[in-house]
Image (cartoon, helix red, strand yellow):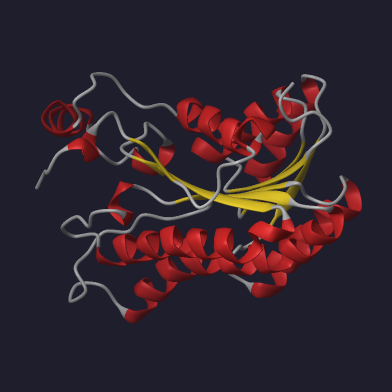
Amino acid sequence: MKLRDKVAIVTGGGSGIGAAACYAFAREGARVAVVNRSPAKAEAVSRAIESEGGRAIAIAADVSVSADARRLVEATAADLGVPDIVFNNAGISPSGRITDISEAEWDECLNIDLKSVFLIARSAIPLMIAAGGGVILNTAGTFGIRAAKNKAAYSAAKAGVINLTRSIALDYARDNIRCNVICPGYVDTPLNEGFPPAARDAFLDQYQPLSGLIGAADVAEMAVYLASDEAKMITGGVFVLDGGQQAGLYA
């Protein structure tokens, strides 16, 4: 078990990539704090893990709020132990050009997708340092590497996540804290359920060299590896999981 006796926090843990990561971490021996804005979703994943013999707790929180970010870290430490792993995965993916979205919509995206990483890392890092180290993983996306039309706020936020990851990696390496970012391409999750199947298939046929759908479990397995001691010398890395999209230029 790659994560035996570790404590992991997963934000956005109630569905999609986050839920897949919660299950994968638990199967590898970690005690998991399932964090989600929806209490019901967090509870469902937590109960499913415990029904399989794992250990999990559900925490309802808005990760973009400083008090909630601090509370979820403290609650995890009090119930499961000091977090060894933090997977900042919660996010939204709004569409719109900057002239089409409101200031409130811009702020919501930047707060949930980028500011939350800062808030939770800021609360977790002192505990990790005192415990001898830890791992922080962040979810960005290929739009953080190359922008896409009609995704101004999302592209900006995810680009910020990539460089914030590098900053954390540089600043806390000597404290034995590693930080890496995962950049998935199109993943078949509830976040993308509004994408009509025919349009999705046409998009993938044109822009994704490898055939097939990337699943949430594929991303979760990458997260397990990066959180484990097998990746002990990897930090500040940008890990792309996109079926080959970034290998060439696309519109």
Q: Is residue 249 above or below residue 177?
A: above
Residue farthest toward the right in the current orientation of the protein? 78
Q: Is residue 120 left or right of residue 194?
A: right
Q: Is residue 97 left or right of residue 234?
A: left
Please tell me how many numbered marks the rendered image carries. 0
Q: Quadrant of the N terminus?
A: top right
Q: Residue at x 87, y 45 (%)?
A: 80
Q: Is residue 244 above or below residue 249?
A: above
Q: Is residue 92 left or right of residue 223?
A: left
Q: Residue at x 34, y 37 (%)?
A: 193
User: Where's residue 194, x and y in %?
Assistant: 30, 41
Q: Residue at x 11, y 43 (%)?
A: 250
Q: In this rendered view, identify the residue nearer to me: 180 or 120.
A: 180
Q: Is residue 44 above or below residue 121?
A: above
User: Where's residue 67, x and y in %?
Assistant: 71, 73
Q: In this rendered view, identify the residue nearer to me: 94 or 157.
A: 157
Q: Residue at x 61, y 63 (%)?
A: 62
Q: Is residue 73 above or below residue 110?
A: above
Res 48 quadrant in image: top right
User: Where's residue 49, x and y in %?
Assistant: 74, 27
